[in-house]
Amino acid sequence: MLGLKLPTDPRWVNIVEKNIEDILTDHAYCEQKAASTAISLIIGFPEYSDLVEEMIALVKEEMSHFKLVHDRILENGWILGRDRKDDYVLALIKFFPKGGSRTTQLVHRLLYAALIEARSCERFRLLSEELKDKELAEFYRKLMVSEANHYTMFLGFARQYGDRKDVDQKWQDLLEYEASIMKELSKKETIHG
């Protein structure tokens, strides 16, 4: 369903289980960055009213997810740690060249967002199936459903605003590129890395 070319190494869950506090902190910031991405799309492309409406709803949802993760951090007696660079996203956004028309820029941003959401969904599924902590596994199962919806929404908007054939080719090329960077990841206590 997600179209990812390289699944996450299941051993990544072992890293997660040894570093729950770090994973939750990283996850909280992922939710915050997703909300920031939605806000930046509103600011950058206000003329796309249907996109703006969906991004408003997404900001609310992502911030509610941030709160859920933050609450879980506090319930464990921890505090939200500092944000760290996301090697996955930094590598991913190098794929498309800078510049181009506003529509091209929008399509590229939507494709990046779709892929980040798809990988998050895949990771959450893995956590929901493999974590020994069943309560935390259920937490990730619920979030997995939202991420799948976000992935399809972003991909749908990219196809709506760009030439469908061109967008689908860019999507396939981006998926191939993402698989190549994933070979170097799944070794850290982060959602994407």
Image: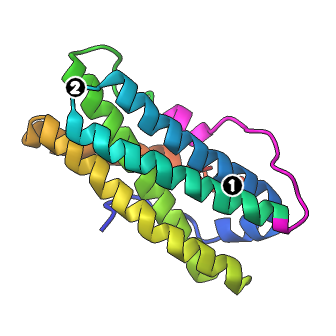
Task: Quickly name the residue at label 2.
Answer: 47
Q: Position of residue 36 (x, y in %)?
A: 52, 36
Does the magenta-highlighted stretch encompass residue 3?
A: no
Q: Position of residue 96 (x, y in %)?
A: 34, 27
Badge 1 density bin: few <14, some 14–19, many ≥20, Cα 10 Å: some
Which SS class for mark 1? loop
Residues 144 and 115: in front is 144
> Taking 103 as reference, is 158 above or below it?
below
Which residue is depicted at the point 62% across and 49% down? Answer: 193
Q: Position of residue 126 (x, y in %)?
A: 55, 73
Residues 104 and 52: in front is 52
The picture quadrant where one finds residue 134 is: bottom right
Can you say which quadrant of the picture contains the N terminus? bottom left
Q: Is residue 177 left or right of residue 85?
A: left
Q: Amino acid at mark 2?
A: Glu
Q: Is residue 136 left or right of residue 96?
A: right
Does the magenta-highlighted stretch encompass residue 87?
A: yes
Mark toward the start of the polypeptide (2 vs 1): 2
